[in-house]
Image (cartoon, grey):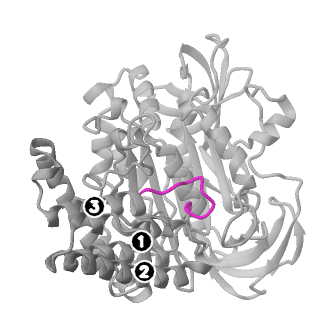
Amino acid sequence: MSGTIRKIAGPLVIADNMRDANLFDVVRVSNQRLIGEIIEMHGDAASIQVYEETSGLAPGEPVESTGAPLSVELGPGLISNIYDGIQRPLEDIMKISGNSLERGVEVPSLSREKKWQFTPLLKNGDKVKGGDILGTVQETDVVLHKILVPARVEGVIKSISAGEFTVDETVAVITLSDGNDKELSLMQKWPVRVQRPYKRKLSPDEPLVTGQRVIDTLFPITKGGVAAVPGPFGSGKTVVQHQLAKWAEADIVVYIGCGERGNEMTDVLNEFPELIDPKTGKSLMERTVLIANTSDMPVAAREASIYTGITIAEYFRDMGYSVALMADSTSRWAEALREMSGRLEEMPGEEGYPAYLGSRLAQFYERAGKVETLCSDERIGTLSVIGAVSPPGGDISEPVSQATLRIVKVFWGLDSSLAYKRHFPALNWLTSYSLYTDSLTKWFDCKVSPRWMQLRTRLMQLLQEEAELEEIVKLVGMDALSSPDRLKLEAARSIREDFLHQNAFHDIDTYTPLDKQLMLMELILAFYDKASDALTKGANVDKLVAMNVRESIGRFKYVPVDDTEKQYNEILVNLDKEINKVLTEGED
């Protein structure tokens, strides 16, 4: 199935004589064999988006269809690897072409030389169906790679072997129901635009603990949930994504650098191998897959990178793992859609984006979730998706932000004014929300404390009342406020500065366990409650606000985890002493 190039428009190539090809087939374009994908068919003319630089191509050059859709290779070797948007391993390409990526380089996604130790879990004569675990490969010290029977395959094991194999060698033979034999290797292929199947989707009811106080306490996300992080330039989207990738309670992390600046992706590539995973004591890269498709790489591959990443994430979810996927950012992906749509001369929608922008975003985010996987046992896997959105000028009324907000259930709105004040993470607590809060109440009550949701509600209430009081202060000044209102403002300031503000680059403050978050909430509210009580007994508000114990509460977040219980009790004792001292001075 080969045709010839008729027209070239940037990443779009139109080829004639392609009647035998199918929509979404992968093609090799020109004598340089550039990778492309058919995205539109008109008679025997095919519109192809090319995933590499098209300069130098000429009409009349050949186009050859592979007859298969754009697919990823799934098997041992994914973890710790760094891919481009169409799953080409960048390190292997560098060995061939040096630091500058050459066009048309053909490198297998998974190494065909490396041998893996395969340990069977089943034996000859066992019945299997799609999703069952044939055996395991210890891919890294942290990740046990489960070799799955491909979906839609059902039969009886005719033979299965232990030992060392490359990803394309046969490890098992299955006799299908029609009597034919099917050979299975450690690797399987899956088209990226097709969602991997599962038995049923379950309601997410467990939080994805991130160690970030403003997220875990005020705006939690579930394992299997979806969240959007919109914010203007410089508001800290990428650092939030990095923090979640480092600390989120997930077995596997898939990080997609989709169209962001190259230096940001370089930071990830430099940082992650050096970071020690607190759960395992090993390098964070031992449970991470990185997809790097920066803003200076071909625009069409940016569109594919999102699908490549989520297909890899679904594959690990099917093993029963908890997977977290970070997409940074979906705005750049939408811009790639807009560019290709414009070159295809489609009718533009709002702000030039294609009319199908909302449905494409929904198709992507709907692939997240908590599912019962395809298998004989009741294996549960989760895939959480956190997408950064980069609205021009920070205006979230633009189409990508609005289409995303209609789909996701968690909105972490970053605020440039907070970032300007050096308050990070710059999540605006008045505009952000999480629709998972109610469904997580039971989990927090059972696993952390029955007081958790009550304390959270009080924090939110104080922050909202502070916003109202700030308006009054702007009009008539602080002196016009009553003593209880001044104390309320001080308590809210303590919530903002001592609880919500978190230093991503501090060894201890970068991650806060849930029990420590609970203690910090209790300390701040204990100060407010006891000071309010003292006010009713005639205490001076200025002396209450100036108590030394407030500094201890503020420093509590920097206390090592092993010392938190001791420090917590000491602060409560000192709080009572200082309150009594203020009351005694008032009587004098």
Which of the two discs, 2 and 1, labels the residue nearer the N terminus? 1
Residue 549: mark in rendering: 1
The stretch of residues the image draws in magenta is 501-510
In the rendered image, residue 81 lying in the magenta stretch gets the answer no
- Label 3's element? helix
**Is 19 left, or right, of 481 in this rendering?**
right
> Which amino acid does the dot numbered 3 rest on?
Glu
Cα separation between marks 2 and 1: 7 Å
- Neighbours of disc 2 within 10 Å: few (<14), some (14-19), many (20+): some
**Which quarter of the rendered picture does the C terminus lie within?**
bottom left
Q: Is residue 304 above or below residue 491?
A: above
> Which amino acid does the dot numbered 2 rest on?
Asn
Nearer the observer, 299 or 238: 238
Which of the two discs, 1 and 3, labels the residue nearer the N terminus? 3
Cα separation between marks 3 and 2: 19 Å
Nearer the observer, 414 or 204: 414
Cα separation between marks 1 and 3: 14 Å
Residue appearing at x 72%, y 27% in the figure: 33
Residue appearing at x 37%, y 51% in the figure: 427
Our reading of the magenta stretch's main secondary structure is loop
Nearer the observer, 355 or 567: 567
**Is 189 left, or right, of 424 in this rendering?**
right
In the rendered image, residue 508 lying in the magenta stretch gets the answer yes
- Label 1's element? helix
